Image (spheres, rainbow, N blue to C red):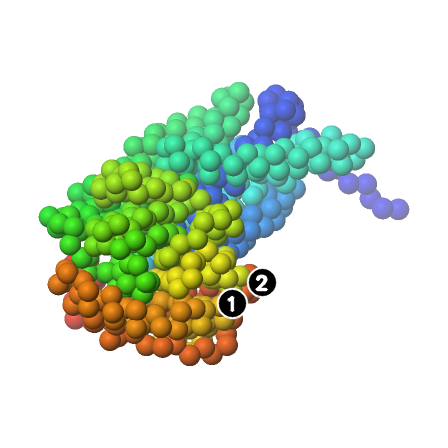
Amino acid sequence: MKKRSNTTKSPKKPLPKILKNKWYLYMTEFFAGMSVMAVELGASRLLAPYFSSSQIVWTIIIGTIMIAMALGNIYGGRSADKNPDPNKLYGRILIASVWIAAVPFIGKLAIAGIAGLLVITVNTNFLIWAAFITCMTVFVYPLFLLGTVTPSLVKYTVDSLDDSGKTVGTLGAFNTIGSIIGTFVPTFISIPAVGTAVTFLIFAGIMLIIGLVYFISSKTGAVKSIVASALFIVCCFASPSMGFAFWEKGLTYEGESVYNYLQVSEDDDCTYLSTNVLFGVQSVYVKSGELSGMYYDYAMAAPLMTERPDTADILILGMGTGTYAKQCTRYFSNVTAEGVEIDDRITDLAREYFELPENISVTTYDGRAFLAACDKKYDVIMVDAYQDITIPFQMSSVEFFSLVRDHLNDGGIMVVNMNMRSDSADGINNRLADTISEVFGSVYTVDVDSSTNRELFASNNKDMLKVLESNTEKLSDEALKVLMERVRRGLVPYTSGGMILTDDKAPVELLGMRVIDDIIQDELVYYKAQFREKGIRGLLE
């Protein structure tokens, strides 16, 4: 006979009274799901000013967050089986809330530190590595902690196998509904209204309250609650105080819109708009009203390629602050210029800081959608629409350029700004030019001096260069005349290689990232030399 064991299982520790209320458990699940999605969207806004908001960066964000949630689910499930102590779960929620509140502060410092480290260690795919390591460093841990919530709550909510399916399904529903709200609120309400930093604080505060309610009601964890609350208060002051470009002093304006981080700076001669702090300037306004010295000047050859440059009807897709429109209306007496800009906050800044006149109209819309809804034809259409550092894929395809062609008058000109010059045979510039050549009979390109820009001019008028030469000779402004002569001499006819971008296949993010990588490598030569000569002090200087 088997000897009967004298040992007995220790009785299960009774749950605190608050956990017997399933609605509290459901609300914990609801706000956890909401906070995860809010952090994901906040992560994209935190990274965008440094690494862009391209599909590549979104892939990195989503991938790392899924890693964190999966690990959290595994750990949470094992922990709940081994030691189902709710104090541990709600302690993790307090830690996650404080970490999320600190993200706008520590995240920006981490980005600067990681970028500095990679400057001296990485030779290729700088942005991809920087974004990935930043996500792993800043976001994985708090989302790992929130990933433990669901399996732990299952342990407390399931009373018996008879209703386990219903209970788990209800938990999942609350998590999903919370995730939906956490998706829409940051994008349409909190980020445009109060910014990314305060958005992190709002959702961190919600999770903090969830944890505090548990510990106060169960009369435990006083030290945890006090410490977490004190750290959260510190974050409330520290996080919003640090701007994205925290090393910059004396900015005229810094803020956010639904689409962009926005920064306005100025000196005695110019006002500048930046939407990405690592990649220079997107718009420049010369206060004297003279030529800007940038690609806008080269693009002014487009009206001169039409038969009546002084009365040309000009449309700019990607209006920005309106520098090109203003230059055209200044140098050509009776032109009409209008623009399309998807970000209405940029238009507001253009009116406020860049002296965009009210008589130049701007439509807040996507450029392609505008053309699809518009019947009007133009003499010149400028395509200067960039999403961060890459052109939107829907404005790079043969279908899009066909739409542009259909909105040009006879002899009309399309000018495209390519802001990342590359001579790679299968690079983004050649693919764009190949695609445009499929639609237009005459295509010419010219590189902009002292920049990474290349301007492309396209038309079905084979005599466009003769028209340019004739109109340039008639110019009365000597500075413009000299510049247009230089542009005309620099124009090179483009021969297509047959690499066509379509709505179905236009990998502009990957192509753009290759060019950016090349540009960054050129820039990193200087910083690596500084590091070799002076060490860390050289990088800081």
Amino acid type at circle 1 is: Leu
| Image quadrant in which you'd find residue 127 | bottom left
SS of the residue at dot 1?
loop
Q: What count of labels does the image hold?
A: 2
- Examine the rendered structure and indicate whether residue 54 appears above or below residue 20: below
- From mark 1 to mark 2, how far is it between C-alphas? 8 Å
The residue at 78%/32% (across/down) is: 163
Residue 156 location in percent, x, y? 66, 32
Q: Is residue 198 left or right of residue 335?
A: right
Q: Position of residue 453 (x, y in %)?
A: 30, 65
| Placement of 522 over or under 363, stated as above or below | below
Closer to the camera, 119 or 386?
A: 386
Q: Do residues under tags 1 and 2 come within 8 Å of each other at their CB atoms?
A: no
Residue lying at the far left of the rendered structure: 268
**Residue placed at 44% from the left, 44% from the top?**
365
**Residue 223, can we see it?**
no
Give the quarter of the figure containing the C terminus: bottom left
User: What number is the disc on residue 501?
Assistant: 1
Seen from this angle, which residue lies furthest right? 1
Front residue of this view, candidates 246 and 475: 475
* Residue for point 19% across, 48% down: 271
Please give left or right for residue 432 compared with residue 244 in the image: right
Q: Is residue 308 above or below residue 272?
A: below
Q: Is residue 24 above or below residue 320?
A: above
Q: Quadrant of residue 492?
A: bottom left
Q: Which residue carries the number 2 mark?
A: 504
Amino acid type at image mark 2: Asp
The picture places residue 404, in percent across and down from the top left corner, at 46, 58
